[in-house]
Amino acid sequence: MVRAPRPRELPTVYRMGFDAWGAGRPLAAYLKECAASKKYRGGEWRVLADGARLLSSLILYRLPPEPAGAAAGLGSIATPPEQRRRGRAARLIADVLRELDAEGVAVVYLHSEIGGRYYRRFGFRPLPARLQRRADSVCMSRGGPRRFPAAYRAPDYF
């Protein structure tokens, strides 16, 4: 089941990404940083849960509307190491995208640090190279324009 995490579950959500984003910090310091993060408070967390067990998580950002319509961003997609390679994140992403489609969201962005191949199955495509703003990730979109005008500005990392 996909749902919002309960406040007491947030440390578990944050811990899912510790091996990828912890950057050698002690776990306690990393969890404290996540809890204080303005970026994390600015989004809506979603988890894939099996009862009380959290299997995967992501954060959903409501972005300013674009000419194509409503826009959103997905970020911090993570699965606990022991749950990886079982389709947990894929199920969560697919369910959240169905939710956004039902709301009429026209374009969804994400910044992939693992390359673009994984996200293509969900309809994401890398933005043109001239629109990429970071060397450590690739900005991808699902929906929205296929041709980007010269004045187009890709969303910053979220």
Image (spheres, rainbow, N blue to C red):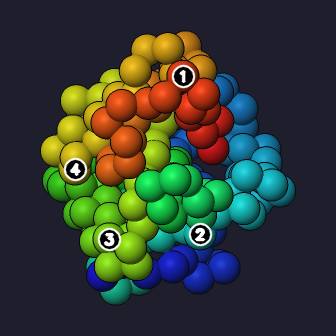
The foreground one among 47 and 18 is: 47
- Residue type at mark 3? Asp
Q: Residue 78, percent across and down?
A: 43, 50
| Whether residue 158 is visible | yes
In percent of the image, x 44 and y 30: which residue is there? 148
Where does label 3 land, which residue? Answer: 101
Above or below 95: residue 3: below
The foreground one among 53 and 43 is: 43
The foreground one among 83 and 102 is: 102
Q: Nearer the viewer, mark 4 or mark 2?
A: 4
How far, Cα to Cα, is label 2 from label 3?
16 Å
Regarding mark 3 in the picture, which secondary structure is present there?
Answer: helix
Where does label 2 land, which residue? Answer: 44
Where does label 1 land, which residue? Answer: 150
| Whether residue 49 is visible | no
Regarding mark 2 in the picture, which secondary structure is present there?
Answer: strand
Which of the two labelled residues, at mark 4 and mark 3, occupies the earlier sequence position?
A: 3
Q: Nearer the viewer, mark 2 or mark 1?
A: 1
* Residue 22: image tag: none
How far, Cα to Cα, is label 4 from label 3?
12 Å
Q: Which of marks 2 and 3 is in front?
A: 3
